[in-house]
Image (spheres, helix red, strand yellow):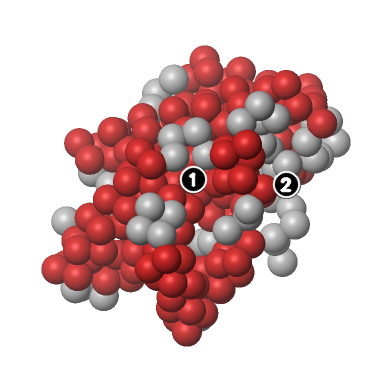
Amino acid sequence: MTFRLHRSIACLLLAACVIPATAAPADDDKEADTYTDRFDLEVREDIFAGFSGDMESLERGIKKCDQALEKNPDHAEALVWRGAAKVFKSGQAFGSGDSANGMKYWMDGLHEMNRAKKLEPDNLGVMIPRAAVMINAGRSAPEIMGRPVLESVKKDFESTYEKQQKIFDQLGEHPRGELRMGLADVYRLLGEADKSKEQLEAVVKEMPETEYAVRAAEWLKAKPTAKLAHNCIGCHEG
C-alpha cells in the first residue's frame, strides 16, 4: 500500500493563507490568545522549505514543535504542524519503498493532527493546517481510508467558513479564494457536485478578473470525471 502524497507545498500554503491575523472572538479571552499567538509564524517557513526538499529546514521546524511540546504537551498548534511534517515524511518513505517507516509516520502524523483537533476543535490555527494536509492525504489514499479523511477535511473547511462568515467579505482575495476553492475541491472529491458548483460560482461572481475566477470557470466547464486538484494561487507562487 502506498500513499502518493503531493510533494507540492501548496497543501500547507493554503493553511497559512486562510488564517486571518485577527480571528479571535471578542467574548472569549482564552480563545483569543490561541488565535493571536500565531505559532504557525514560528515554524511554517522551515516546514514549507522542507516540503520543497530542504530536509535540514524540515527537521528544524519539527524541533521547534518538539520544544513547544516539551513545555506544553497539549500545545495543539505544535501538534498539528509536527503531524503535518510526519505525514509528509510518510510520503517520502513510501516513495522510497520503505513501507514500514512510511506507515509509522502516516499513523503518527494522523494521530497528532487528530489529537490537536480534539484539544482545540475551534482553533483555526489547528483546523486549517490539518484540513489542508489531509485533503491531499485523502486524495491519494485508497477510498476505504481516504473517504473518512476527506469527510473530516470537509468539516474543518466548513467550520472555518462558518467562523469567518461575518467578516468573509473583509478578507483579502487570497484567503477568500483559497477557502472557497478548498471547499470546491473537497466537495468534488466526495461527489457533492452541487455544493462544489456553488462554491465555484461564488468565486466567479465575487472575484471577477482574478486567477481564482479563471480557475473556477475552468472547473465549472470540466467533465465530472476530470482529475482536478487545487494548488495555492498567488503570494507563494514563483
Q: Quadrant of the C terminus?
A: bottom right
Q: Quadrant of residue 46?
A: bottom right
Q: Quadrant of the N terminus?
A: bottom left
Most extreme residue toward the front is: 29
- In the picture shown, does residue 227 fall above or below 58? above
Three-letter residue code for mark 2: Ala
Q: Nearer the viewer, residue 13 or 208?
A: 13
Most extreme residue toward the top is: 194
- Whichever of callouts 2 and 1 sits on the residue coming sooner in the sequence is 2
Q: Quadrant of residue 227?
A: top left
Query: What kind of element bears circle 2?
Result: loop
Q: Nearer the viewer, residue 33 or 139?
A: 33
- Binning the other alpha carbons within 10 Å of mark 2 as few (below 14), some (14 to 19) or many (20 upward) gives few
Marks 2 and 1, how far apart at CA: 14 Å
Question: Can residue 215 be seen from the camera position used here?
Answer: no
The disc at residue 126 is 1
Q: Position of residue 149 (x, y in %)?
A: 32, 38
Q: Which residue is mark 2?
A: 21
Three-letter residue code for mark 1: Val
- In the picture shown, does residue 55 fall above or below 159? below
At a point 61% along the width and 26% down the height, the residue shown is 163
